[in-house]
Amino acid sequence: MIVILRYGVNVPYAEEWDFIAFFVAHDLGGLRWIDLWAPHNEHRMVVPKIVMLALAPLTRWNLRAEMLLSAALAFLGLLLLLALARPALAEARPWTRIWATFTLSLLVFSLAQVGNWLWGWQVQWYIAVLGAILAIALTTWSLERANPWPHVVAAVLAALVCQYSLASGTVIWVLCAAILAFHAQRLRLLAFWLAVALASIVAYAIGYERPQSLPSLGLALSDPVGLLRYVGYYLAGPFGRHAGNGAAVAAVFAALAWIVCRRHWRRPELFVPWIALAGFVVGNAVLTGIGRLGMGPEQAQTTRYVTISLLMVAATVPLGIVALARVPGGRWPQARRAAGVVGAVALTVSVIATDVRRMRDIREFSQSKAAGRDCVFAIETASDDCLRNLHPNPMTVRERAPQLKSLRLSMFARSG
């Protein structure tokens, strides 16, 4: 939040200039449901569009308010992760619980999400992630209920929020179905869940046309190695710009998950939410790779993806605590304890080091947007190069800036 207040700039950026058309249509009384339903790239951003349109009149479309909303949603996600981690932390030592809370907080608020923290439009990522975590949490908690239906119905709503915020959020239906398979009433629950999922996916597909400007989907089939590299870059998340880091994260997670599942199969609350979160990350990585591989595997290093990829790293925290916990009669207790301490220190130090390195990117992004804002105030004499700080097509800024000023929104809210 401090970073947003210090470095957030109240000026439209990239897609936000196109979103001004929604305010113009609303001002003229011509905003239609179809405008909210229309796809943006692969996404039907129904929920984020509604949220942004509802928030704008309250703040005069101050884009820092959307950035702060992203932080608030991330905080709610953190609370859900901590609630899910209670069974894993129940028998842990006090210092372990303190470390887990601190490290999960560092991950959720990682500064590696540069492009999301300082860009109001990216609230869609935090809405989608919160919807995914909530759906996973509710279906997990339903396993302990004789009457699971209130939790399952609420999970359906959370899954809809996730899917209709981010296209790749569709994988949440499969993941939560896998969780419900552990319930004694699995047949009825799965029949209901899958029926709603199918209806939602069919509705999503009706009238959908993928933009021709996006790379071909077939490239992933012809270049599986490139797709693997893309997924590796994606999974690296807050740990740098190397596909090997992503492979290492996946390997560590898989090893911990195997240990916990093998040891605690009859206690699904200890492993199903974390495997589902990792599945959400991998599913997003693969689907995004299929859609974006034509831009090169390195495109997966885009910082906006970190908001999702960090969930796999976060999932290793409770899994690691359970996997390395003392077991009566277990072998090598000292070795397990040493491995836990080394792993904990390495993880926390790595996240902090990443935050320190990313501060430079944050300052540069903020300065670039501030320079573009100053040029918009002098739009008549501003150069195209300066306006490209805000949009790749300077003409879009020139066309929308007068509309923004007329509506007295965002940077023009106090003018006149």
Image (cartoon, grey):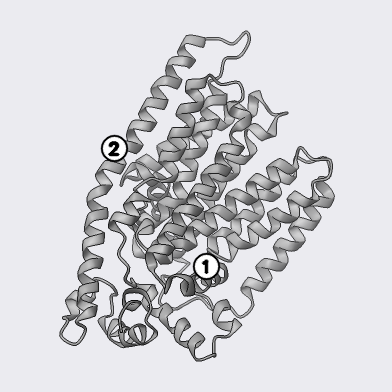
- Left or right: residue 145 versus residue 270 is right
Does residue 377 lie above or below 89 as drawn?
below
Residue identified by numbered label 2: 353
Q: In this view, does 150 lie to the left or right of 11?
A: right
On the picture, is 395 further left or further right than 408? left
Residue 200: image location, x then y, percent = 68, 67
Task: Look at 51% across and 10% down and name the residue there.
Answer: 333
Say which amino acid is labelled 1: Pro
Mark 1 nearby-residue class (10 Å; few <14, some 14–19, many ≥20):
many
Picture coordinates of residue 353 (x, y %)?
Answer: 29, 37
Q: State whether residue 28 is above or below residue 341.
A: below
The image quarter in which residue 19 lies: bottom left
Label 2 Cα neighbours within 10 Å, binned few <14 / some 14-19 / many ≥20? few
The amino acid sitting under disc 2 is Ala
Circles 2 and 1: CB distance less than 8 Å? no
Q: In which quarter of the image is the C terminus?
A: bottom left
Q: Is residue 17 above or below residue 297?
A: below
The location of residue 368, given as percent across then percent down, is 22, 65
Q: Of callouts 2 and 1, which one flags the residue occurring earlier in the amino acid sequence?
A: 1
Q: Can residue 221 be seen in this view?
A: no
State the image coordinates of residue 184 (x, y, percent, origin top left).
83, 40
Q: How many labels does the image show?
A: 2
Describe the element under mark 2 as helix, strand or loop. helix
The disc label shown at residue 48, or none: 1
Secondary structure category for the residue under label 1: helix
Quadrant in the picture for residue 292:
bottom left
